[in-house]
């Protein structure tokens, strides 16, 4: 058993892992939708991963290590998983993503009223599952397709606490050598887990909490974060 697994199994109740970072969701005129997770702070250390749903419905995960690929594919549903380098760079309002078959660049705009309100949420509150429970229904009403809590794969539970939201205004991208086309709404919603990203292309500052099953001895890879 790994050191990380021993740490997890030593926690009473349902061990919880926390990921602090950003989620970007975009649609394209080719029909492909892309969800980027950029996690400067996580139980695996800093990393980024990309979830892609093609126009034909194939769900693809691009993850930087096998350990992360195993954890993410154990939480969400994919048809194909590829372990590839995933590099993300940020220069002011422009994000550049390179992940083997995918090259993506998008630019964010000024945050609106909802983004300003979310920035006022204290971090300690956003990390609490009870806050995610309280915001789940408003999120469904205001941000079509979004849920802030639900059941994930492998008997896991998951909560999202948002602290910022900025619109994505422009995008260029190539997947497997094919141009992804113009930026569009995320429509239809992506089908990786219990909820989708906002319909309008957005970059969300978020804390994600994953509760593992009580028998977590066989979970790969992650240090417990409180």
Image (cartoon, rainbow, N blue to C red):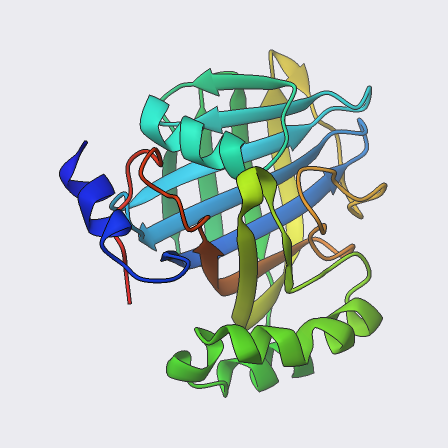
Residue 168 x %, y % = 64, 55
Q: Can residue 112 be seen in this view?
A: no
Q: Which residue is drawn at 49% across and 25% down?
A: 62
Q: Please give left or right for residue 196 compared with residue 172 in the image.
A: right
Q: Which residue is drawn at 59% across and 68% down?
A: 165
Q: Measured along the vertical axis of the image, is residue 199 above or below residue 29?
A: below
Q: Please give left or right for residue 30 compared with residue 101 in the image.
A: right
Q: Is residue 32 visible?
A: yes
Residue 145 x %, y % = 79, 56
Q: Please give left or right for residue 85 compared with residue 112 in the image.
A: left
Q: Measured along the vertical axis of the image, is residue 153 above or below residue 159?
A: above
Q: Which residue is drawn at 81% across and 33% down?
A: 29
Q: Which one is nearer the viewer's eye here, 142 or 91?
A: 142
- Position of the C terminus, as image quadrant, is bottom left
Residue 222 x %, y % = 29, 43
Q: Measured along the vertical axis of the image, is residue 32 above or below residue 170?
A: above
Q: Residue at x 39, y 19 (%)?
A: 84
Q: Please give left or right for residue 14 compared with residue 184 in the image.
A: left
Q: How many marks?
A: 0
- Position of the N terminus, as image quadrant, is top left
Q: Which residue lies furthest to the top in this view?
A: 177
Q: Which residue lies furthest to the left in this view?
A: 3
Residue 122 x %, y % = 43, 86
């Amino acid at each position: 058993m790994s050191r990380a697994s021993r740490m997890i199994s030593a926690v009473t109740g349902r061990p919880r892992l926390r990921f602090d970072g950003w989620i970007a969701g975009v649609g394209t005129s080719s029909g492909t939708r892309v969800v980027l997770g950029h996690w400067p702070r996580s139980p695996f250390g800093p990393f980024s991963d990309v979830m892609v749903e093609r126009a034909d419905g194939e769900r693809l995960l691009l993850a930087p290590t096998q350990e992360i690929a195993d954890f993410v594919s154990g939480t969400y549903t994919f048809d194909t998983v590829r372990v590839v380098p995933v590099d993300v760079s940020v220069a002011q309002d422009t994000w550049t993503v390179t992940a083997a078959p995918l090259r993506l660049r998008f630019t964010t705009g000024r945050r609106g009223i909802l983004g300003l309100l979310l920035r006022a949420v204290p971090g300690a509150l956003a990390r609490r599952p009870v806050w995610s429970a309280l915001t789940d229904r408003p999120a469904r009403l205001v941000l079509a397709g979004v849920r802030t809590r639900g059941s994930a794969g492998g008997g896991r539970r998951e909560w999202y606490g948002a602290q910022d939201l900025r619109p994505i205004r422009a995008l260029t991208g190539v997947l497997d050598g094919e141009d992804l086309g113009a930026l569009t709404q995320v429509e239809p919603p992506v089908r990786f887990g219990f909820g989708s990203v906002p319909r309008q292309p957005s970059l969300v500052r978020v804390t994600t909490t994953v509760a593992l099953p009580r028998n977590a001895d066989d979970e790969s890879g992650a240090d417990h974060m409180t």
